[in-house]
Image (spheres, rainbow, N blue to C red):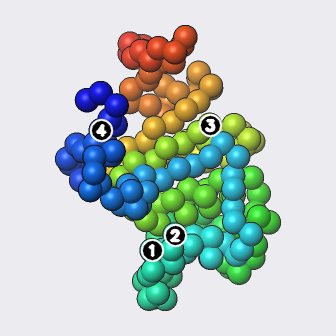
């Protein structure tokens, strides 16, 4: 399809530029994780709940339940459950990255776009993020941009290389 971008959502391919396609629905189904963690200037709890509130969800029990589940999915709950009222920016770099991942997961996206998700992290935090990504890819499509060539095969099912403006699939390496 010339000029269009097709994406599979809910098991069906659709052009995101076709008239009638709801961009809000696309934003809800696709999460974005930046290279540098970007927690909002608010508590850990409010950081994770923010997308739900943007959707107009006001049920506190539902927000609390979904937020806790997202923090658990991001392997962060045990570290922050007694610190939910603290500013999210006070967490370590690795915790901030997992907080941002939890904030994306709270909307139960079908696709996560990750730009160098471990580049600003120490080796231990990097290992935790890799473990998290391996878990997430079982239920969610992950598209990861990375320069870490040793990391890519550990977490990827398919690898593509962008060089000279051309995208090519990298053959499996045994």
Q: Residues within 10 Å of mark 4 (few under 14, many from 20)?
A: some
| Labelled pair 3, 2 in contact (Cβ < 8 Å) | no
How far apart marks 1 and 3 lie (CA) works out to 28 Å
| Labelled pair 4, 2 in contact (Cβ < 8 Å) | no
Residue 6's tag is 4
Q: Earlier in the sequence, mark 4 or mark 2?
A: 4
Q: Give the left or right position of residue 82, taking residue 72 as reference.
A: right
Q: Earlier in the sequence, mark 4 or mark 3?
A: 4
Q: Residues within 10 Å of mark 2 (few under 14, many from 20)?
A: some
Can you tell which quarter of the image residue 172 is in? top left
Where is residue 93 drawn, in percent x and y?
Answer: 74, 52
**Identity of the residue furthest to the left in this view:** 12
Mark 2, residue position: 51
| Labelled pair 1, 2 in contact (Cβ < 8 Å) | yes
Looking at the rendered structure, the secondary structure element under dot 1 is loop
| Quadrant, the N terminus | top left
Mark 3, residue position: 116
Mark 1, residue position: 55
| Residue 41 appears in the figure | yes
- 133 versus 90 height, above or below: above
Where is residue 103 drawn, in percent x and y?
Answer: 55, 63
Looking at the rendered structure, the secondary structure element under dot 2 is helix
Q: Earlier in the sequence, mark 1 or mark 3?
A: 1
| Labelled pair 1, 3 in contact (Cβ < 8 Å) | no
């Amino acid at each position: 399809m010339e000029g269009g971008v097709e994406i599979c959502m809910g098991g069906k391919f659709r052009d995101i530029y076709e008239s009638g396609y709801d961009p809000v629905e696309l934003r809800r189904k696709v999460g974005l994780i930046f290279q540098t963690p970007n927690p909002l200037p608010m508590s850990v709890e409010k950081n994770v709940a923010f997308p739900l509130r943007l959707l107009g969800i006001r049920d506190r029990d539902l927000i609390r339940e979904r937020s806790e589940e997202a923090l658990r999915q991001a392997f962060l709950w045990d570290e922050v459950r007694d610190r939910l009222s603290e500013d999210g920016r006070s967490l370590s770099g690795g915790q901030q990255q997992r907080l941002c991942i939890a904030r994306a997961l709270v909307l139960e996206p079908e696709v996560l776009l990750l730009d160098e998700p471990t580049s600003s992290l120490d080796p231990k935090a990097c290992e935790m993020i890799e473990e998290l990504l391996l878990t997430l890819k079982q239920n969610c499509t992950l598209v990861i941009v990375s320069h870490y060539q040793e990391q890519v095969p550990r977490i990827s099912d398919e690898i593509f290389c962008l060089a000279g403006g051309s995208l090519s699939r990298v053959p499996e390496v045994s």
